[in-house]
Image (cartoon, helix red, strand yellow):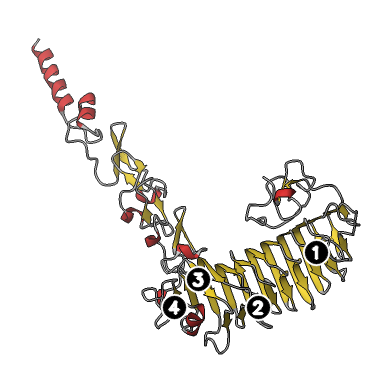
Amino acid sequence: MKRLLLVSLFLVAACTRQNKEFCCTSAEDCASVGVDDDRRECGEGLACVDHQCNPALCATEGCTVQAPTCDVMRDVCSACSTSTECARFPSATVCDPATGGCVECVSAADCSSAMPVCDAQACRGCRLDSECASLACGEDGACVAEQQAVYLSTTGNDAPPCSRAQPCRDPRFATQQTNGNRQHLVFLKGNYDVGSNYTWSIGTGATTAPSIKIHGGGSTITASTSDGFVTLGIPALVRDLEIVNTAFFAIRAQTTVTLERSKVHGGAAGITSNGSLTLRDSEVRSAGCGIQLNGGSIAIDGVTITGGANGVCAVFPTVVDFKNLLVHGTSSTGLDLPQATGTIAFTTVTSTGSAGTSATAVRCTFSNLAFTSSIAWTPNLSRPVIDTCTVINSIVGPMPIVGGTNLDPLFVNSSNADFHLSGGSPARDMANTGPKTDFEQDPRPRGARFDLGADEAP
């Protein structure tokens, strides 16, 4: 009996002795396994897993940006709570409180001046003026500083400095304030009524700036009569501006001009150019020729031209590069290009009028002007739709032309000027290659292949 008692006392003493290899994570956990409550810590670099202290496998460098913090006691990677926990990730140094992961940015404040926009938790260059506090996005994707811009407002006064705080009003006066250090004209959104006989010259004599960037901000410049004009004599970029009722918008020889997301409406001759002209995502409407080319070159992508006698006229030798162009509602030939060479691709010319004696949709003189992956459709007119141009993989008709098919393209509603392709259009999925977007910036392709013409059907 005495011997049994001694053995029992020895066993009790052994069971209550602390084993340093065992651990627990909470008071309840400790009680459930009979481990002392003070065994919640295993020591540096050790984790309590299955109540035993072992080397932590989630060493901080082993965690990912999605769960960057190592919870050593549980040996699991967990959410971050501060950006200091993200410092070791070169391209994801900011803690996103919504997800607990490390990201490049959660706001523009986390981005650099060269990549100022936070988009989907990643920094990128600006694309729109509205993405910049200065309302001016540079061509390099960086936001323009306010001191580099001349500002206009419909309630401004034509006196220096034409700053954001003290803007001027007349575009002509504002142009005179530009120079080598201030090459940006920024319109605060509004309708700028400039009256009649308004002439706005941007070039030598009006400015010492080597080039001009016009940030329209959705503004409109409206003349009361179509007798004024705007002339560009130095390289220029025009964005988000509508010009209404001027006689013409002129680009001089040897001048490079780009219009983006802009509109030229009214007037006798929309745009005239003998320089290097680029139009993107824009609209032209005039009483005469929408765009008159007196030489030089022109590139079009995502443009609608409507009304007037012709959409585009090339009266002097000009190199053209058209894609995603819609021309409709002209009284005569849609594209009158007897002096042009180049390429017309993914273009739709339709609903042209019967005036004149030449081809109803596209008039060419040179066979090295290619009409490819496009639609020229002028029903109820007996004259040829296209002459001389080389037609490649296009819908042309109803009168048949070599190189094209004369199947009805089946627009959604031609009578209401809806020239999108309907579901059963033969123009769908007919081209192997094409641009990334259509004339409305919708993605291409949407099917197995690219659609012909300006529109990519859903």
For the residues carrying marks 2 and 4, which lies nearer the camera in this image? 2
Report whether 410 appears left or right of 216. Answer: right
Q: Earlier in the sequence, mark 4 or mark 3?
A: 4
Q: Secondary structure at mark 2?
A: strand
Which residue does the numbered mark 4 point to in the structure image?
A: 148
Residue 145 at x, y = what percent?
Answer: 42, 74
Label 2 is placed on what type of residue? Answer: Ala
Q: Earlier in the sequence, mark 1 or mark 4?
A: 4
Which numbered disc covers residue 250? 2
Query: Can the viewer see residue 86?
Result: yes
Alpha-carbon span between mark 1 and mark 4: 46 Å
Query: Can the viewer see residue 138?
Result: no
Label 3 is placed on what type of residue? Answer: Tyr
Q: Earlier in the sequence, mark 1 or mark 3?
A: 3
Report whether 255 appears left or right of 24. Answer: right
Instruction: Spot the residue most to the bottom.
Output: 205
Along the line of sight, the residue nearer the viewer: 127 or 401: 401
Q: Secondary structure at mark 1?
A: loop
Label 1 is placed on what type of residue? Answer: Ser
Residue drawn at 46 percent across, 62 percent down:
131
Residue 319 at x, y = what percent?
Answer: 76, 73
Q: Secondary structure at mark 3?
A: strand
Q: Is residue 22 above or below residue 60?
A: above
Q: Earlier in the sequence, mark 2 or mark 3?
A: 3
